[in-house]
Structures are given as C-alpha cells and as structure tokens.
Image (spheres, coloured by chain):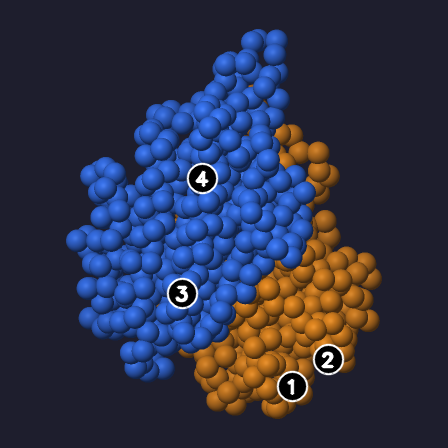
Chain colours: A blue, B orange
Amino acid sequence: MPPTSIAPSPNSVFTPIRFTSSPFPSSLPTPTFLRGQSVLKPRFQTKLVVRATVSMEKETPESERPETFLRESDGQDHAASSASSVRARFEKMIREAQDSVCSAIEAADGGGKFKEDVWSRPGGGGGISRVLQDGAVWEKAGVNVSVVYGVMPPEAYRAAKAAASADQKPGPVPFFAAGVSSVLHPKNPFAPTLHFNYRYFETDAPKDAPGAPRQWWFGGGTDLTPAYIFEEDVKHFHSTQKRACDKFDPTFYPRFKKWCDDYFYIKHRNERRGLGGIFFDDLNDYDQEMLLSFATECANSVIPAYIPIIEKRKDLPFTDQHKAWQQLRRGRYVEFNLVYDRGTTFGLKTGGRIESILVSLPLTARWEYDHKPEEGSEEWKLLDACINPKDWI
Amino acid sequence: MPPTSIAPSPNSVFTPIRFTSSPFPSSLPTPTFLRGQSVLKPRFQTKLVVRATVSMEKETPESERPETFLRESDGQDHAASSASSVRARFEKMIREAQDSVCSAIEAADGGGKFKEDVWSRPGGGGGISRVLQDGAVWEKAGVNVSVVYGVMPPEAYRAAKAAASADQKPGPVPFFAAGVSSVLHPKNPFAPTLHFNYRYFETDAPKDAPGAPRQWWFGGGTDLTPAYIFEEDVKHFHSTQKRACDKFDPTFYPRFKKWCDDYFYIKHRNERRGLGGIFFDDLNDYDQEMLLSFATECANSVIPAYIPIIEKRKDLPFTDQHKAWQQLRRGRYVEFNLVYDRGTTFGLKTGGRIESILVSLPLTARWEYDHKPEEGSEEWKLLDACINPKDWI
C-alpha cells in the first residue's frame, strides 16, 4: 500500500490538508503513518508522487469569537470522559497563546492595535486571524489560530488498510487539526522578524476498519530572522528555545535546531531564511501528554525569547542602507514562503483563507539584481551565517 | 509510452529544461511530442507525474560577448548547407531584439544604463543578461538572451521510441533552445510594466533511432501589467499585438490573447497578473519559416507597443496612494512569478542562473493584509479587469 503523508503548515497559517501518496513502498523507518516534511524531503525529488487535492470549504465570516471551534462531541476525551480531550486542551492552549502574544506585541508596540477576523467553516472548525499593520514598532504582525475538520482519503491512512479484511474497502478517515501561527515583521532593520507555529493533528478511529487506531502528532517551531546579527540577541533567543526543550528531553534542542536549519532553506540561493531556532514535525513517539506540555512550553517561550530583543533594538538609529538591506532580506523571506514553505504553497493550492496564509509576507520587500554585500561587512556576516548555520550556544 | 513534455521558460529568463513524464497515456490531442504549459495545466492536478530533474552545468562568466553562442556545427542548416540554420537565424534575431530594446529603453529613460553580464556553459551555449536598475524612468529593467544545449531523456522523445525497433533502446536526445526574455518595471505608477519572451526549441534527429525526425517549436508572448488603466494605452498595446498577429494568421490574435489571459492567472487570487497581450507555446503546426518570421515580427513589435505608452505616462504626477497601489500590484507580480510561472519555478529547481531568473522580480513590492479597493475607484477598475479579462479592441 502506498505510504502517505499529511503535512500541516509549518508557516504562517495552519493549512493542514496535504495528501501525498507514493506508489513506491516506503523504505523509510516511520514511527507514524503520517510523515512530516523532514522525512518527505528526499522522496519529493526522486519518486512518483500523487497529489490528491483536498479543497477546503469556503470560510464564513463571524461577528464574534465562539467559545470553541470544536464540534460538540469533541469536548470530552474518548478514553476518559471525565477529562478534557487533547483536542479541547490544545485549542485552549493556542487561543491563550494568541491572546498573550498579541497583548505583549501591543504593549511593546505602544501604538498599533490588532484587527481581528473570525471565521468558521460549515463542516466545523474555523479560525481567528489577528493582524497589526503599520504600528510604531512592527510594520506587520499576524497571529492566527485555526481549527480544521477534514476527511482524508483511506489510502492516506495505512492502519485502516491493514486492519481491513481483504473484501473490505475502508472509507475516508475524518481528521482534526489545530494550530497557532505567527509572523512578526518589525520596522527597525536591527529588530528581527519572528515566526512561530504550533500544531496538533489527530484522526478518528475509522469506523469501517475495526481495530484501526486513532492517530495523532504534534509539530511546530520558533525561528528568528534578523537582517543584522547581534550575537547576544541570537544567543538569548536560542538559549530560551534550548531551556524549553531541555525541560523535556536533552536531545530535543540539538535535533530540532538542526531540523530548523534544514527546513528554512532557500535552495536556489543556498542560504537559510534566517538564523533558525527550533522546528519539529511528526512527533508522536513520546507520551501524548508530554508532547502537549512541550508544545505549550514552546508557545509560552515566544514572548521571553523575542520581546527583550525588540526592546533593545526597536529604537536604534539606522540609515537608508540598513533599511535597504532589511528589505532585501525581506525579499528572501518572500522567496522562501512562496517557493518552499509547504504550508503556504499547499494553502494556496487548496483554497485556504488567502489573506490569513499570506499575512506571513512582509509589508514591503526588495529585489536588487546581483546584490553582493562587501566581504567582512555586517551584511556579509548575516549572509554568511545564513549560508553556514552556526551553533549559537 | 509515457507522454512527456518540455516547457521552456515563458518568463524572465529562458530555462528550457523541464521534463515531466506521466505513466498514464495521454488523452490529449497533441500535434507535437513536446507539450507546453497550456496543455499540461489540467494534467498536473490529477495525474501521476515523474520529474526527471535535469540540473544545468554551472555558468562561467565571460569578459566579452562572443559572436555566437552556437556550437560551430550549428551555423549551417542540415537540410540546405548554403543557408543559415534556423538556430543561427533565431539567435541573431533575439540578440538584435535585445540590442534594440535596450537602446530604446536607455533612450526613453534618459539616465540609466544597462549593466551587462555575459556567461557561457562548458557544454555549449550561454547568455547575455542586461539589467538597468534605478534609472530615471525604470526602477528595474532586465533584458536577457540565452542559448542552451542539453540532453533530454529518450522517453521525452516519442518519435525516437516509435522509430526504434523492438530490441533497440534509444539513447538520450540532444536538444537546443534559445530565447529572449524581458521584464521592464517603471517607477511611475501610471506607467505599466511590460514582459516579453520569445523562444525556439529544437531536438537533434536521434542517431540510434533511424528515421526519427528532428523536432522543433516556437513559443513566446508580450503582455502588459499596469497599476492603473488608461484605456487608450491598453487599446494601443493590444492593437499593436493584433497587427503583428494579423500579418500571419487572423486566428492568431484571438487565440493567443485568450492563451495569455489563461496563462498569467494567479489562481489563489482568482485574478490575472495584468491586462494580458499575447502568449503562445508549442507552435509547430505551421511552416517553420513562417513561425520564425512571426516570432521576429512579435519581437519587433515590443518597442512600438510599449514606448509610446511610457512617453505619455512617465512624468505624470502621482500621490503616495498611487505608489502604494502600484506596490501592491508588484506584490501580485511576485506571487505569480514565484508560485505559478513555470520558467521561474523550474529555473529555481534546476539551478539556472538565479540572478537572471529573478531579475523579473520588481525592485520593490508590498503586501497589505486584506486590502480591498473601494468599489468604483480606479484601483477597483484595474482589479476588476484582472478578474474579468476584457476585449480591448
């Protein structure tokens, strides 16, 4: 049976419905039936790929935030009906993260206010997009949460196939996905851009394949994209990520730091988008409660990792040259997001909410022909660190 | 046998080596074995696709323009050794077009000068990239020619398979491709962006499949992307394209006008990049000499179609609001080129000369969250014409 994978958006907005199935048997040791981008990467280049496009229902604007985007049946855990389900707790976590990040951004901005759009989809789920544009500190800051109910083709769910008897054809498998996603682009060229995204994915246990289990995984990350390097800032940022990781597993930070460097890679430039951070996907080979706590810890680390850097850099004087270099790096940000970011590219293809997906793009960007920073300059140092990722701590 | 297609770049720089073969028999009536983008479009979404990536040799900078990028053996026609080959005449035509367009742009700009980069590839071929940046009239103007020698897998060449006997395995088929490509982005928001690209593709007759013919086709187009509509400008532009077409075939203009509207479509926005023009690809079901003349006529129509519009609009006074709208439309230009343009996306994947490929991107662009022009405004009228393509003449 074709191995299959579903890769929710690692960037900008949560667009969790990509189905990619290969007619080749997988030679990859996958602990889960759902394989994320790191595992998929090598396969894309060499193997047959089928894309079963899943288009999304059109979103409906809502005038008020609902208490939850979950379907009623999802409030209680299937295993232990006295406890809240992981779905419910994850939604609560990402909405709290959205609230606290937006509050911290507004406080640090001291001028701009977030504009909120709430929307739902007829079949369940919905989202809250918040955007602060042309503030005092940030030129564009987007913080989105979304909850998606979808149905994936049976070939995407290997466990269902395995559990089905020979004459039984398993039907489509319902799935649930939720995430918080944010990109924050400041005005000052010495103040870095930040991106973070945390997401949870779960399938139902398929009704027509008895014995096939429900499946779940976590993904996400936080990464920093400055135009100029202040080593103390980058150290502070990475240290905060490491501290969050170390509370759970000493292997997490080195592994997820490398994953981040590998993921945010602009292949045609042979350079990374920025100076990295952490990135993980497809995580389910740990205790589910532990991973929920870990994702929560990561989301809670965004403000302490980022805001102190902003406070130090937001008012530094700068020249037109500094601004032009920032704008060139913003161009690279656009290139990465439109060409490589799987969430963005898939969101565009499947009809997700375009304005939420593309809120990750900077307010302004620039492309100069054949621009090469002078060797040894501050611009060159940044570029060098994007080409040759460093260990910052 | 899998049908296969090779789609040279319709945009920015000429990157002619995409091989896409499908294990499904094609149900499409293709007059040529080489199918271009219009035909491929629906297949991408539903069928199995193999990408046999052909990476390009690294380019070598040259200090001087060579008289020709052709291999020595290519100067003479294979059929009539007294006449210049189509390859040679096409190269001559695109280099003359590059010269005359660059001269006209420099004259109209009255300040900026083109910077030239010449490069070659070890296996033959090369190119000339010319870029004028931050001129008086244009913020970025790129005019490139390139000549590529490559080898395509035998399954890309159906005629070779057909001619081969059962126990004979045809080998790789050498091909030749050449093109001129240009994007011109003015500063004034009332002066439109122009793109044009004309290209010629030819295979050798495969040596190990006697009887299999050499194959060839022409592609190209010229299209206009204003931020504001001056109806007389758009009429003048389309009329000039129509006149060029009508000299050859009365069906060309209506057919290639629609093809253009269909090609420059930003699917996730449900709008076109601009107000169109003409676009064609995969043309070989006409006399080869006639199509060479037609491509030449089209290339020669660029200056009379475009420069009079620039002269009228380049000095019009404008406000910050006009400029911001132009920048938003530049953002759409970036979205089209990075997400949809097959030449650009394939060039990025196969390691073409990045700076030549991305010279099509504007110097500056802008993305505002959820920007909607006021109904009935000039901005709205432009957007409306991008959503609902009009007949301008």
Residue A282 in the image, given as x and y percentages of width and height: 39, 35
Q: Amino acid at mark 3?
A: Ile
Query: Of marks 2 and 1, which one's residue comes earlier in the chain?
Result: 2
Q: Amino acid at mark 1?
A: Arg
- Please identify the quarter of the rendering in which residue A138 is found: bottom left
Image quarter where the C terminus of chain B lies is bottom right
Q: Which residue is mark 4?
A: A89
Are the residues flagged by discs 1 and 3 in contact, CB closer than 8 Å?
no
Q: Which residue is mark 2?
A: B230
Are the residues flagged by discs 2 and 1 in contact, CB closer than 8 Å?
yes
Are the residues flagged by discs 3 and 2 in contact, CB closer than 8 Å?
no
Looking at this view, name the residue that lies furthest to the left.
A393
For label 4, the crowd category at 10 Å Cα-Cα, with few meaning under 14, some 14 to 19 and many 20 or more, is some
Q: Which residue corresponds to the image point at 28% horizontal and 65% vertical from the top-left?
A: A308
Mark 4 falls within which chain? A
Q: Secondary structure at mark 4?
A: helix
- Mark 4–mark 2 Cα distance, whole angstroms, equals 56 Å
Q: Which residue is mark 1?
A: B313
- Please identify the quarter of the rendering in which residue A390 is found: bottom left
Q: Are marks 4 and 3 on the same chain?
A: yes
- Mark 4–mark 1 Cα distance, whole angstroms, equals 58 Å
Q: Nearer the viewer, mark 3 or mark 2?
A: 3
Mark 1 falls within which chain? B
Q: Are marks 2 and 1 on the same chain?
A: yes
- Mark 1–mark 3 Cα distance, whole angstroms, equals 42 Å
Q: Identify whether A226 is placed above or below B123.
A: below
Q: Which residue is mark 3?
A: A105
Q: Are marks 3 and 2 on the same chain?
A: no
Q: Nearer the viewer, residue B198 or A236?
A: A236
Q: Are marks 4 and 1 on the same chain?
A: no
Q: Amino acid at mark 4?
A: Arg
Residue B340 in the image, given as x and y percentages of width and height: 57, 54
